[in-house]
Amino acid sequence: MIPLIQNNITAIQDACKKYHVKSLYLVGSAMDVGRFTNESDVDFLYRFIKEDKPVRAFYFLLKTFY
């Protein structure tokens, strides 16, 4: 796992609770320090507890970190 994720794990957990994320998985190059470069992005697979308004919740989840 890359330092960006490791150093922000508490903030990520807090955002998941706030926006009712049931599960969040880190996938892709961010899982491997050796594969992650300055041109890489961070990819997550996610599932919300209530899936009636997932797009709105996802927008606010992203806004928390950018």
Image: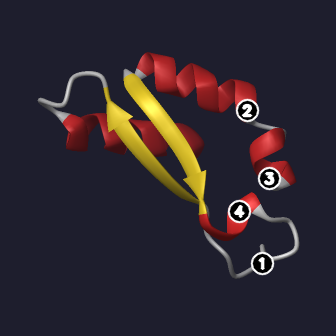
Q: Amino acid at mark 4?
A: Ala
Disc 3 to disc 2, how far (Cα)?
11 Å
| Of marks 4 and 1, the one in the foreground | 4
Disc 4 to disc 1, how far (Cα)?
11 Å
Q: Which residue is mark 4?
A: 30
Please tell me which of labels 3 and 2 falls first in the chain: 3
Question: Label 1's element?
Answer: loop
Q: Amino acid at mark 3?
A: Met
Disc 1 to disc 3, how far (Cα)?
15 Å
Q: Which residue is mark 2?
A: 9
Residue 36 position in % (x across, y down): 78, 73
Q: Which residue is mark 1?
A: 38
Please tell me which of labels 4 and 3 falls first in the chain: 3
User: What residue sits 79% from the left and 77% below the top?
Assistant: 35
Asked if the residues shown at circle 2 and circle 1 are in contact, with their CB atoms under 8 angstroms apart, the answer is: no
- Left/right placement of residue 43 relative to residue 53 reads right
Disc 2 to disc 1, how far (Cα)?
20 Å
User: What residue sits 49% from the left and 26% below the top?
Assistant: 16
Please tell me which of labels 1 and 3 falls first in the chain: 3
- Left/right placement of residue 60 relative to residue 11 reads left
